[in-house]
């Protein structure tokens, strides 16, 4: 297990009672490969184990992106999301960890939150967005999908019609729309994002940790069955990305062209 100081794809910093986890691949718009996911798992476990930590902020490095999801270039190159130390691709584990960590997780959405990056912020307890943030799903454009928490839980948050619109059309939505839809809790100017996220984090850090823990678990119970669906969806995605249809999406993105799905049928 890498130490928090040895991370390559993320940064892990402690600021008083707050752990700040930053996805740090700005040249790829903070897209995640298997290593990134593994390091995020270690970071959230470290925050769980540290009794001084009362809240976690998740954000992305640079001004452009929070995260644009799975690293599509890596997938086009190797057909998978690359190596990890454990040999596992722990996406489901990461999603569960954000939910199960008995401390609030605040997403500070500093730019594009697309695809799996969008799912990450949706799973956080609270989302605070920069005015420049943009939100969307991208799977059907790049031969991918998150049909677990990415669909079911999203629909709980913003409603069925809007969730289906997000997935079926792969459009991007601005921060004002996200706030109107209840997808984020607050929108602030870009230079206020981290100070505002820290304000929220330090405010909740003053609350009874045990009360917060039980409340978070209670909120989760209503959607806990979706974890099983998420396992099914990830297993299905594993198989789908190896198909010609899945590969067409990743290849088109890497080659900077529009995908051609016309030869595929159900
Ligand atoms: C986000 C864009 C719409 C931004 O467009 P634009 O502003 O024009 O910038 P670009 O020039 O396209 O991008 C700048 C630069 O970054 C590279 N890049 C951006 N996103 C990715 C990415 N996802 N993977 C790899 N590289 C990326 C881009 O190539 C540019 O580099 P150059 O060298 O300058 O060319 C647009 O970039 C875009 O559409 N990006 C792809 C978004 C996408 O399709 N994401 C994947 C969705 S599917 C998914 O996430 C499911 C996978 C999954 O489950 C998963 C997998 C692995 C880990 C975690 C997860 C998960 O949590 O879900």
Image (tube, grey):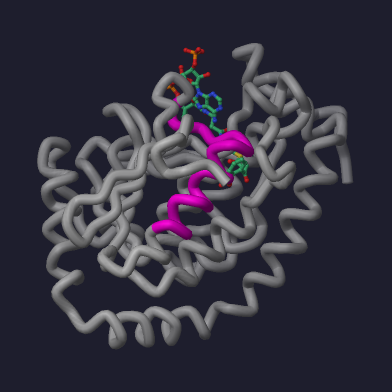
Residue 148 position, x and y percent, is 64, 61
Picture residue at 88% right of the left edge, 46% below the top? 266
Picture residue at 52% right of the left edge, 84% below the top? 222
Query: Looking at this view, is 122 or 38 the one in front?
Result: 38
Main secondary structure along the magenta-highlighted residues: helix
Q: Does 5 appear above or below 215?
A: above
Residue 83 position, x and y percent, is 69, 33
Q: Is residue 137 visible?
A: no
Q: Quadrant of residue 111?
A: top left
Query: Looking at this view, is 38 or 215 the one in front?
Result: 38
Stretch in magenta: 29-46
- Magenta-colored stretch includes residue 40: yes
Decide if residue 59 is on the left or right side of residue 156.
Answer: left
Q: Does 203 appear above or below 262?
A: below
Picture residue at 70% right of the left edge, 71% below the top? 228
Q: Quadrant of residue 263?
A: top right
- Magenta-colored stretch includes residue 186: no
Q: Quadrant of residue 240?
A: top right
Decide if residue 13 is on the left or right side of residue 84.
Answer: left
Residue 25 position, x and y percent, is 44, 27
Report the number of discs.
0
Picture residue at 62% right of the left edge, 51% below the top? 91
């Amino acid at each position: 297990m890498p130490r928090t100081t040895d991370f390559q794809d993320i940064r892990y910093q402690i600021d008083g009672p707050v752990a700040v986890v930053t996805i740090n691949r700005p040249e790829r718009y903070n897209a995640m490969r298997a290593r990134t996911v593994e390091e995020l798992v270690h970071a959230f476990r470290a925050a769980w184990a540290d009794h001084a930590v009362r809240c976690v902020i998740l954000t992305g490095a640079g001004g452009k992106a929070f995260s644009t999801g799975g690293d599509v270039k890596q997938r086009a190159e190797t057909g998978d999301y690359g190596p990890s130390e454990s040999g596992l691709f722990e996406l489901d584990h990461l999603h569960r960890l954000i939910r199960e960590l008995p401390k609030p997780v605040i997403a500070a959405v500093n730019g594009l939150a697309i695809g799996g990056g969008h799912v990450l912020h949706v799973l956080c307890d609270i989302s605070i967005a920069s005015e420049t943030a943009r939100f969307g799903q991208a799977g059907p454009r790049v031969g991918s999908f998150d049909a677990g928490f990415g669909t079911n839980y999203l629909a709980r948050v913003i409603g069925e019609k809007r969730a289906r619109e997000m997935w079926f059309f792969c459009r991007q939505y601005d921060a004002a729309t996200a706030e109107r839809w209840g997808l984020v809790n607050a929108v602030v100017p870009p230079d206020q994002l981290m100070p505002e996220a820290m304000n929220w984090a330090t405010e909740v850090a003053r609350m009874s940790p045990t009360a917060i823990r039980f409340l978070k678990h209670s909120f989760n119970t209503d959607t806990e069955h979706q974890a099983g669906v998420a396992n099914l969806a990830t297993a299905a995605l594993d198989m789908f990305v190896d198909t010609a249809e899945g590969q067409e999406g990743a290849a088109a993105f890497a080659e900077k062209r529009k995908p051609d799905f016309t030869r595929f049928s159900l």
